[in-house]
Amino acid sequence: MSLAFLHAHDCSEPHSDAIWGAAWTSTDNVVSVSADGSIKQWASSSGQRHPPNAEFPAPHTLGLVSLSVSPDGQRALYNSLEGLTCLWDLTSGEIVGRFESYTRSAEGAEPSWSVSLSPSGETYAATGGSGNVVVCSAQSETFGQRVASLASGRSKYGMFCKHSPDGKRIALSTETGQIYLFDVEAGTLTTTYTSHALSVRSLAWSADSSLLLSASEDKRLVLHDVRTSAGGTVASFTGHASWALSVDISQDARLALSGSADKSIKVWDIGARAAVSTVQDTGEVWSVSWRPKPSAGGAGAFVSGGEDGVVRWWRGAGVAV
């Protein structure tokens, strides 16, 4: 099987530097963060800023490296290069939470690198240099206050963390290729995967929280079934010529999506364990995100962001964005 994905349109006002995070929200908008320190929201149908004539938050002095959007598409959590974590209300345009994680005011405090908003929106997870996960309050009055600490037992830099859609687990990936799963309620480490030889840059959960897909500098994607205790590795996907930088799973868990430093985007048939489409971009592809709403027929649509600062929408042949 092969699929055709066509370029639909670009954003109206590109970022001035690389896009390090892009997320297609359940409200059918897209949020993007960039190395230029800016965060923006776009209407997916047109690529215009959303709402029209909206004032986005003032650009930060350093790049924004991590982005997480709430399931209802109402809030975006993002983090800067030095560890400033902010929560943006996408409806009002206001910053409703701000925490300087680099201020070492508490024992064991460290600058955050990757952040993930919990599905309930009550807390967020953060990871950084220690290779542990810190769970913090996402409430406006107590934003950033530590709620719990989840220790991996290894002092390896935390590259990426991601809540499962059901909120029961947090996955953490490291610079040396390990992936750790934590039970949120119990506050314990439950599983360690050693599926990769190099840094794991991105993680994606299936909608039912049973599958976890990882993208690594070893050029591979690895699919894990978190319901099994004996390793959990289901499949390995190869085909990128350079680092796999970003990954996502479609809402129906039929297709996977990956962006790479080889300047390509690949669509994978999870059941067939094969690439079914390759899209060539202009530079390194740092972020990819499927449209969360199913399309009427066809293979759906996705958005990408990368080295040139342009948010791009792509649609399956015969599908309108």
Image: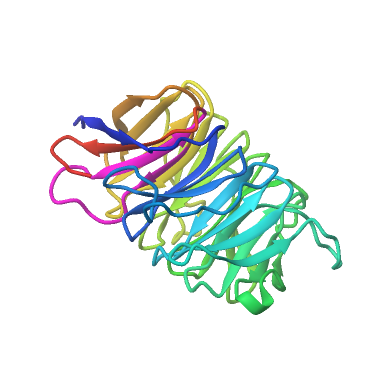
What are the residue bounds of the magenta stretch? 287-307
Front residue of 229/87: it is: 87
For the point 36% across and 41% down, which residue is it?
303
Residue 266 appears in which quarter of the rendering?
A: top left
Front residue of 277/121: it is: 121
Q: Magenta stretch: residue 54 in it? A: no
Front residue of 141/151: it is: 141
194 sits to left or right of 153: left
Location of the C terminus by quadrant is top left
| Placement of 154 over or under 201, stated as above or below | below
| Placement of 231 over or under 137, stated as above or below | above
Q: Does any portion of residue 273 appear in the rendered image?
A: no
For the point 48% across and 39% down, which residue is it?
246
Q: Position of residue 31 (x, y in %)?
A: 45, 50
Q: Does any portion of residue 12 appear in the rendered image?
A: yes
| Placement of 17 over or under 155, stated as above or below | above
Q: Position of residue 70 (x, y in %)?
A: 46, 64
Q: Magenta stretch: residue 291 in it? A: yes
Q: How many marks?
A: 0
Q: Check the image and name the residue furthest to the bottom.
A: 141
Q: Position of residue 4 (x, y in %)?
A: 21, 30
Residue 13 appears in which quarter of the rendering?
A: top left
Front residue of 315/42: it is: 42
Residue 138 appears in which quarter of the rendering?
A: bottom right
| Placement of 25 over or under 241, stated as above or below | below
Q: How is the image coloured?
A: rainbow
Q: Position of residue 125 (x, y in %)?
A: 62, 63
Location of the N terminus by quadrant is top left
